[in-house]
Each structure stands twice: as structure tokens, then as C-alpha cells.
Amino acid sequence: MNASRSDLIRLVAGREIAVKLRDKGFLASTLVFIAVIVIAVVVPALIEGDTPEYTVSASSEARPVAETAAALGSDGGPSLPAADITVMDTDDPAASLTDPEVAAALAIDADGGVVITARESVPGDLEELVAAASAVVTAQAVAADAGLSADQLAALTSPTAPRVELLEPKPDQPVPPELVIIIFGFMFYFTVLTFGVAIAQSVVEEKSSRVVEILVAALPIRWLLAGKVLGNTVMALGQVLLIVGAGLLGSKAIGKGEIVTQVLGVSGWFLAFFVLGFLMLACLWAVAGSLASRVEELQSTTLYMQIAVMVPFFAAILIQDESPLRVALSYFPLTAPLLMPARIATGDAAVWEPWAAMGVVALTALALVAVGARLYSGSVLNTSARTKLGGAWAAGGRG
């Protein structure tokens, strides 16, 4: 019984997947990328959640400053560092430093100033809290001498902040949208470039070893191309899903569920545009490989494809402010796979815009697949020399 077209395409796709899964370089790069994403998510959160603890000895005169510093450290507002300060009474601040648990000792000099004594150095956040506490205690003393009430003192030292009203407020997000755009942009660049070069290299190796002649004898050229594109698309999408999933699981594990919610809202659109963008370029990567007669020629035949991958990456990184240029590029087929998800991440895209851009990219992908299939058909069997685009096009039309 003869195999159907779909069976043969799946067979070629399975071969491409099997080769990739045996590639140690691919497996290592995937594991490294996953580790980097997990570390980038987990380590900052662990560092952020680690509140330093200090034991401070204080003379009776300096105890109000020490207690005020402890209060500011526990809830000093966004402008002061957080710290858990334990105050210990002492008659001799310098002598108390013989205790290794004591980070610093506070005393009052003859002029009424606060003196911080430490063994080698004073932690920066502790010094900042003591300085702020000293200012608060001094202000309270001056206010008491002037006969000001607590409310009057508060009005002088903590005036009412101005009220902020936003005409078009954007929702607060746990991760800056710009960072999400950079991460997704780098994944798009890395994955498409890696798999694109792999497709081109696979094609030229089959040409130089003349294996392609055996393959073409068993199935039509366009089916061979379809299997290659399908297999690499599955692997590329699988790699991206693994990386995104690892980052989301890491966020969930450290209790950052709000990060998961934010990223999931963008990742669906990114993955949809990623698949269309990859399909749009995959056939052309195969064409770049088929134009070369040996591996050494790939650098020149894939040059324009490398530029086609770099352009959307740098556009997404450099153009982050909403502007007519950004809107236009979010519909341009080459840059839409990254610019439109970027506009979704920053909340600048209307509800209908991603669908319109997706339609543009899908139509462009269909056109480029047709063009790529003709060029591939016209060049993949020319194993003797490098093929020109015009010659590949003409030969593809005769095939």
C-alpha cells in the first residue's frame, strides 16, 4: 500500500525531530536557556525577600534614635531600606562591640550629635536608617522647644503629598513590560536563528552528500520541504514552550503568581505570532541552504535571512515608545511577530489590532511558502555549483 502525502510528510518531520533530539548542542543550549530563565526569576525574588537583621547597642541618650531607626526599618516607606533592628542597652558602646552579634553601637557626643561605632564598617542600609532617625528625633526636640503640637510637627515634616490623576492609567504590573518584551524578543531571535541555520545546514549537507537525490526519488521535493519545515517548527515551538513554562513554574514556586498572570496574558499572542513568523521564514531558510553547494557557502547564502531575523529583534528592543512608526511596524510582516505582542504587553494595542496583524502575517507566510517551495524545487538538486536565485526560480517553474 502506497503511503499518503501526509504520511510521508510526517515521516520526514519525524526524522528532523529525531535528529534534533540527538543533537547534544541543541539539548545543552536548551538546558542552559532554561537554567538562565529560572535563575533570572528566582534569584532576584530571593534577594528581594531577604530582610537584613542587625543588633544595635545604644546608650540611654541614644536609645530614642535607635528605637526610631528600628521603627523606620520595619515600616519606613519606599524611600528607606527595610531592616530588622534589635536595640540593646549599654553603658559602654565601644565595649559592646566585643559581642560579634552587635553590628554597631550608638552614642551621643558632647554637641548632641549621634556617633555610630562599628568594628570594621557600618552597613549602608543601617547607616541610612540611623541618619533618618536622627533627623526625626532632632525635629521632634526642636518642635517640643518651640511648643508645636504633634499635628503641627507632622505638617512640617510630612506634608500632604500631591494627588495624582491619570487620564489614561495603565495597570500596575509586577514585571516591567519592557523586560517582558526583551525576554520574548531574545527568545524569538535565538530560536528562529538557531533553527533556521539548522534547516539551511541540513539541506546543504544532504546536497553535498547527494542524499537528497535518494530522498527525492522516494517523495516529491515539495513534500520533503514540508516535512522539514513541520519538524523544525514543532521543535522550535516545543523549545519555546519549555523555556516559558520553566520561567512560569519558577515564578509560581516562589509565590509570584502575579508574574504568571501577567506573562500568560502576553505569551499566548507571542506564541501565535512566533509560529506564523517561523513558518513565514522557515521555507526561505531552506532555500538559503539549497542555493549553496557546500557548507562553506552558507555564510553568504544565509546573510539576508540573518538580517531578516535581526531586524524585528532590534526593532522591538529599540522602539518601545508608542509612535506612528511603532504602529506601522507592528503590521509589517517581518516585524509584526514581535512588535504587535510588544504593543499588547504595554497596553497600547486595541483589541482588534492583533487579529488584523496576524492576518497580514498569515497571508505573507502563505505567499513566502509558495515562493520558497518554487525556489527550493529549482535549486535543491543542483549539487554541482552554487545556484543563482533567477536560475532557481526558472527551474522551479519547470518542475
Image (spheres, grey):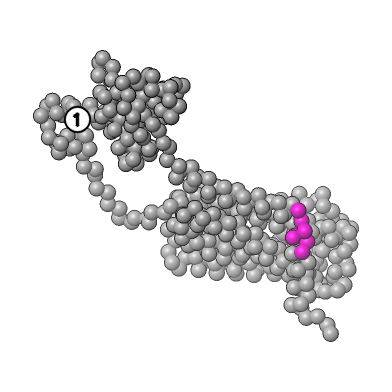
Q: Position of residue 303 (x, y in %)?
A: 71, 51
Tell me how many marks there are: 1
Residue 317 vertical position relative to residue 380 in the rendered view, above or below: above
Looking at the rendering, in which quadrant would you find the C terminus?
Answer: bottom right
Quick check: 203 left or right of 79? Answer: right
Q: Position of residue 152 (x, y in %)?
A: 14, 36
Relative to 40, is 26 on the left or the right? right
Front residue of 77/282: it is 77
Of 307 and 66, nearer the camera is 66
Farthest residue to the left: give it: 147
Report the span colored magenta. Answer: 18-24
Q: Which residue is mark 1?
A: 140
Whether residue 131 can be seen here = no
Q: Which is nearer the eye, 349 or 237?
A: 237
Q: Residue at x 39, y 25 (%)?
A: 104
What SS does tag 1 mark?
helix
Residue 271 is left or right of residue 79, and the answer is right
Please determine whether, in this image, residue 74 is positioned above or below residue 16: above
Q: Position of residue 134 (x, y in %)?
A: 28, 27
In magenta segment, residue 22: yes
Question: Residue at position x 24%, y 43% from top?
Answer: 161
Instruction: Give the crowd class for mark 1: few <14, some 14-19, many >=20 residues within 10 Å.
Output: some
